[in-house]
Amino acid sequence: MFDPSAVAENVLKRFQTVSRNRGTWEAHWEEVARRVLPSYSGSFIAEGDSFRNGEKRTEDMVDATGALALPRFAAVYESLLTPRNSIWHRIVPADPILKRNRAARLWFEEVRDVLFKHRYAPRANYSSQQYDAYLSMGAFGTGALFIDAIDPRYGMGLRYKAVHLGQVYFLENHQGIIDTVFRRFELTARQAAQRYGVEKLPDKIRQNATDPAKGETRHWFVNCVKPREEAEGFDPERVDVRGMAWADYTVAEDGRHLVHESGMNTFPYSIPRYITAPGEIYGRGPAMLVLPSLKVLNEQKKTLLKQGHKAVDPVLLAHDDGVLDSMSLKPGAVNYGGVTADGRPLVHTLPVGRVDFARELMEEERATINDAFLITLFQILVESPQMTATEVLERTREKGILLNPTMGRQQSEALGPLIERELDVLAQQGLLPPMPDIVRDAGGEFAIEYDSPLSRAARAEEAAGLLRLVDWARDYVNITGNPAPLDHINWDAAMPELAEIHAVPVRWINSPEVVAQIRQSRAQQADIQTAIEAGPAAAGLAKAVPELAGQGAG
């Protein structure tokens, strides 16, 4: 039987356990934030976003290389994985037989178009929030993107929110998949009453909410999304929230009171992680991997500034028994007695260190940092502007090979759950097109095929191989005049797959039946043309036969 008090107590106890085990991570993240994402500085040691607005956060950052590289890293990930101006994934039937059915493929293509329409709608706010999640992953190794239906007051569709890593806490299941998310946040008593209703609040918060003098008093809440268990009343046959696979609880810390219960059919978070170490739940990002270089570069910049100051405004050395009593350093000033009669200066500058050597050391650290943040991807054309297009593609493909392991993780851990959640929300709102009977009979199961620039480059190797084979065969035909090698190529099988590799929409491709009709019509036209061309010759032959016969008789 469902017991709200027991659920609230269980949520808070589990949250206290996971929050106590994260102190080392938060100190690490805070150190990284001060060097690459100063807007987050102070947020991990001040409970999420509870810090003074507008305060300066760049006091510890002398060199800005890391802070400039991080946004470019996020831009690389967005352009290679989720480019906002292109279709970066397809939804196809999971059944290979159904995949060959044109009606089924057209329906899944329509579903994809509806999904992209709502994902990139202005109110959805997907692009900016996904970018923030990539920023968090680049800096701290982990991001969190919450996907939900938009507020009904604004219509129907999707809404995205990148959640600050300082607010969310994760747990994995036995397969290493994140299946539990805690989020701790603050609301004023008035906001809590607006969001959950006064009657659902514990006594203390309810009293503050109804008192105009205390309505802005802030209170802490813990939200928990987790797999629903039988002890919590889970029954898959039910049609209410207790029949949904995922439980959504919100508990007020004051009074340890359950203020909200809901449910979801799909996990509402997309959680990208860069890499994970054995036994760790949270990821480690590029900034964490090159934190030593970031620290060294910061200290090198301090030293360079000191030496540069000395070089520009040097220390002066003068003999204590000299005749020069005072010296003016004003521009254009004349200092009498500063040289001997033979022109030898009596005042010298103190030699400074090798500023150029300090710059070389800094460039080495900058190269390491930029390489970790994938900045070198943007330097392909800059370094070798004379490269041909083929060479550029080959260099890009080589970079893609290095990126595939981490990019592949994003597809399985972040983008897969993202798309599954989006489709579930749209289906609940009735925004997807009616399902054809043939798809419904197959259970409606679907698969996701990623068509981002990175995955397309990997699959393009097949197309490139076919084109190279055609070139070799064509050269052979031109040399020998024998077209036999071309007979090995099955163009009827190759063309549909080439269209798929190059992201050509299904509706732009003729069905096999239409192709057969076109070929039949072409054959008929060829027969007619042959007959027309043969007509004069046949008529001449018919006329010549009697004449020849007459000559023979004569």
Image (spheres, rainbow, N blue to C red):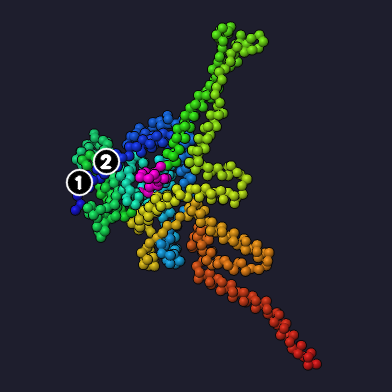
What's drawn in magenta, residue-wise?
Answer: 268-284
In the displayed structure, 146 sits above or below 463; it is above
Q: Is residue 508 above or below residue 226?
A: below
Q: Which residue is mark 2?
A: 16
Which element is circle 2 on?
helix
Residue on which disc 1 sits: 5
How packed is label 2: few (under 14 Cα within 10 Å), some, or many (20 or more)?
A: few
Task: Quote the CA–CA distance across marks 1 and 2.
Answer: 17 Å
For the point 54% across and 64% down, the residue is: 495
- Identified by mark 1, the residue type is Ser
Does the image show residue 420? yes
What residue occupies the far bottom of the structure in this picture? Answer: 553
As displayed, is residue 367 above or below residue 92? above
Q: Position of residue 430 (x, y in %)?
A: 35, 58
Q: Quadrant of residue 218?
A: top left
Residue 111 visible to the viewer:
no
Q: In the rendered structure, are the residues bearing label 1 and label 2 in contact, judged by CB atoms less than 8 Å apart?
A: no
Q: Quadrant of the C terminus?
A: bottom right
Closer to the camera: disc 1 or disc 2?
2
Magenta-span inclusion, residue 533: no
Q: Magenta span: helix, strand or loop, mainly?
A: loop
Q: At 47% from the left edge and 50% from the top edge, which residue is drawn?
A: 404
Instruction: Point out residue 501 in the picture as x, y percentages from the top left corner.
Output: 51, 58
Indicate the secondary structure of the residue bearing disc 1. helix
What residue is shown at x 63% (from left), y 45% (from top)?
386
In the picture, the disc for residue 144 is none
The answer to which of marks 1 and 2 sits earlier in the sequence is 1
Left or right: residue 167 compared with residue 238: right
